[in-house]
Image: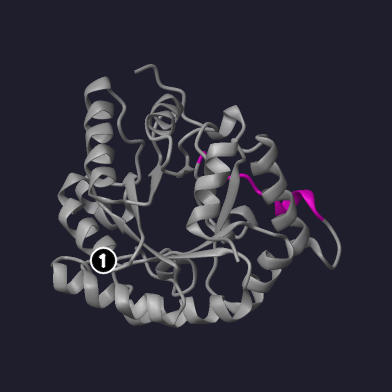
């Protein structure tokens, strides 16, 4: 089973690693066979599984249920689980929510935020709970951002994001996840923290790992498709097409062919 120590070693060795969202045992087993390195039980399940308009209605109980299902189906990947909207508003909330999903099978929790999360990260880490901090475009704050938009478009905004990263890393964050930021900034942050694995989604090719929502990379997104998505299912055929798509994604992340320039945001900072 892949651990946090393995992700750190991959970064030190310059080896990229793959991550996909997953919510059920059968998909988790296919990802195990495809040797996908890490799995995120994302609160994206609110939209992709539950058919909601956003991630906001998702509960901790929802996350624990799907985490347990994924863990039963996969004994290979590192398992991260989102703490959903308002489930870590206080330190006690964060501890209780983390306890619930860790006992369900998670090896790490993921929270959205910036420097204001530092105390929470410190307390969780002290209690043996590794934390991935999600920065940039954070879907739980979609109403604050006014929609799903590229973040840190200016040098000033980029420097603020870097300061947020420094604050949570100093507090003990084990992993950073950057969403929808310029490729240059993704590279800067990845290089700034030599011992912290950085996962990107729409953050350029220089991050240590890449993550996509599984429905997106299988072409099951109906309506607008984000710039950073690649449909790996379209490239496959036959009875094992889904498994082959997972294998192709894993290979493309490791060899650096995903994301390609057309899947990144090139902004001069």
In the picture provided, is 196 more to the left or to the right than 219?
left
Relative to residue 162, is residue 241 depicted above or below?
below
On the image, the x and y values in percent for residue 77 come to 59, 64
Q: 10 Å neighbourhood of mark 1: few (<14), some, or many (≥20)?
A: some
Residue tagged 1:
85
37, 48: nearer the viewer: 37
Local secondary structure at mark 1: loop
Chain part drawn in magenta? 227-236
Quadrant position of the N terminus in the picture: bottom right
Report the residue that reaches farthest toward the top: 268
The magenta stretch spans residue 73? no
On the image, the x and y values in percent for residue 189 come to 38, 32
Q: Residue at x 33, y 80 (%)?
A: 100
Q: How many marks?
A: 1
55, 114: nearer the viewer: 114
Q: Main secondary structure of the magenta part?
A: loop
Relative to residue 251, is residue 214 depicted above or below?
below
Residue 8 visible in the current orientation: yes
Q: Residue at x 66, y 77 (%)?
A: 26
Residue 221 visible in the current orientation: no
Q: Quadrant of residue 47?
A: bottom left
The magenta stretch spans residue 229? yes
Q: Residue at x 57, y 44 (%)?
A: 10
On the image, the x and y values in percent for residue 68 come to 49, 81
């Amino acid at each position: 089973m892949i651990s946090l120590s393995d992700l750190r070693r991959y970064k030190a060795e310059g080896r990229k690693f793959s991550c996909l969202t997953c919510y059920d045992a059968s998909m988790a087993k296919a990802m195990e066979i495809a040797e996908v390195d890490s799995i995120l039980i994302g609160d994206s399940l609110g939209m992709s599984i539950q058919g909601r308009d956003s991630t906001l209605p998702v509960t901790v109980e929802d996350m624990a249920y799907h985490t347990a299902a994924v863990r039963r189906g996969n004994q290979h990947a590192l398992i991260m689980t989102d703490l959903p909207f308002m489930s870590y508003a206080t330190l006690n909330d964060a501890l209780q929510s983390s306890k619930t999903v860790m006992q369900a099978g998670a090896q790490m929790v993921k929270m959205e935020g910036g420097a204001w999360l530092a105390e929470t990260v410190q307390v969780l880490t002290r209690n043996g709970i590794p934390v991935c901090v999600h920065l940039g475009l954070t879907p739980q704050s979609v109403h604050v951002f006014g929609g799903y938009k590229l973040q840190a478009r200016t040098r000033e905004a980029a420097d603020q994001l870097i300061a947020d990263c420094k604050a949570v890393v100093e507090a003990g964050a084990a992993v950073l996840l950057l969403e929808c930021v310029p490729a240059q900034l993704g590279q800067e942050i990845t290089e700034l923290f030599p011992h912290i694995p950085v996962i990107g989604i729409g953050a350029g090719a220089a991050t240590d790992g890449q993550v996509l929502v599984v429905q997106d990379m299988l072409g099951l997104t109906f309506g607008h498709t984000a710039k950073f998505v690649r449909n790996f299912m379209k490239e496959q055929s036959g009875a094992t097409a889904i498994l082959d798509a997972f294998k192709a994604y894993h290979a493309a992340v490791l060899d650096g062919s995903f994301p390609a320039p057309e899947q990144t945001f090139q902004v001069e900072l």
